[in-house]
Image (cartoon, helix red, strand yellow):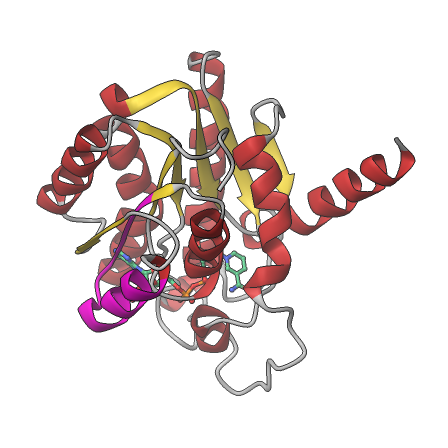
Amino acid sequence: MTAETSYRTALITGASRGLGLALARTLARDGWTLIIDARGEEALESARAELSRYTRVIAIPGDVTEQEHREDLAGAARKAGGVDALVNNASNLGPSPQPGLLDYPLDVFEQVYRTNVVAPLALIQALNNELKPQARIINVTSDAAVEPYEGWGGYGSSKAALEQLSNILAAENPGLRVYRVDPGDMRTQMHQEAFPEEDISDRPLPEESVPGFIELFTGDLPSGRYEARALAARVGTATADS
Ligand SMILES: NC(=O)c1ccc[n+]([C@@H]2O[C@H](COP(=O)([O-])OP(=O)(O)OC[C@H]3O[C@@H](n4cnc5c(N)ncnc54)[C@H](OP(=O)(O)O)[C@@H]3O)[C@@H](O)[C@H]2O)c1
């Protein structure tokens, strides 16, 4: 733990596996206090137990779409003395396999938007008074937010909404850093659900996307859209050049 990070706190949604857990592991090893959630209690407890070997961890099981759960997260942030970073990582892919838009069940479409768009904004609102000066809001999006992949109309359009929401939030709040971040394809449960018939063993592990995120947690980059792995490569090159 360095003196610089010993007092920092991050709230990461969906940190029981995949990218959220990979980010939490790296921050935990650098001494950040963590507030984490996920719906599945067993996996969340297992993550808490592992991360607690390195740092203080507050694990709150629950669903980001529920207001009471978000209030619990905000209460934990208050007790921790505020947060330096909020990562809206928890996400809903929708049905697997994903249907075309003309066949998309609208009740599920609404649920995808509730998780991927409404809940991140609601959590930002709930945490508004708990964001420390210069806090970072990191909204995890996707290349599906900008590419017209067939079958990705529900999830992809929700991530596009999250991107523009982030863009406008940044314009409205110059004191905050608001990052919208495409982590790239990652070998995770969500990715397997997106490609149910495919062997995804060639996809990179989420750990490979973490260094780019760390640059956003600790660096001084302006609000904007970033691709995590390209960012890590750029920073690595700059470091090598300097
Ligand atoms: N994997 C990829 O290739 C890829 C590519 C581009 C973008 N992304 C984005 O990267 C982020 C992480 O994805 P991942 O692949 O790591 O997913 P993942 O392995 O499926 O993990 C998702 C995490 O979020 C939690 N979660 C899901 N819904 C939740 C809810 N309503 N409330 C609270 N927690 C919830 C899950 O636990 P529970 O299910 O127990 O709640 C789990 O901890 C997502 O925003 C995703 O859209 C992923």
Q: Check if residue 37 falls in the magenta segment.
A: yes
Residue closer to the observer: 82 or 146: 82
- Magenta residues span 34-50
Question: Is 44 in front, or is 25?
Answer: 25
Figure check: 30 above or below 176? below
Give the quadrant of residue 128.
top left
Residue at the right extreme, as displayed: 241
Among the 4 quarters of the image, the one containing residue 214: top right
Instruction: Give how far across and how far down residue 117 sits, in percent.
Output: 34, 42
Tell me where residue 195 appears, x and y as whole percent.
Answer: 52, 77
Residue 184 makes an appearance in the image: no
Examine the rendered structure and indicate whether residue 107 appears above or below residue 130: below
- The answer to whether residue 190 is above or below residue 133 is below
Asked whether residue 195 is drawn in magenta, I would say no
Q: Residue at x 40, y 50 (%)?
A: 89
Q: Quadrant of residue 209?
A: bottom right
Query: Relative to residue 7, is residue 207 drawn left or right?
Result: right
Of 36 and 32, the residue lying toward us: 32
Q: Is residue 174 toward the left or the right of residue 10 in the image? A: right
Question: Residue 85 at x, y = what percent?
Answer: 41, 33
Q: Position of residue 56 (x, y in %)?
A: 29, 47
Q: Quadrant of the C terminus?
A: top right
Q: Please tell me which residue is depicted at 42% across the width and 60% down the height of the picture.
A: 21
Q: Left or right: where does residue 121 sit relative to residue 159?
A: left
- Quarter of image, ligand 1: bottom left
| Tag count | 0
Picture residue at 42% right of the left edge, 53% below the top: 24
Q: Is residue 128 visible?
A: yes
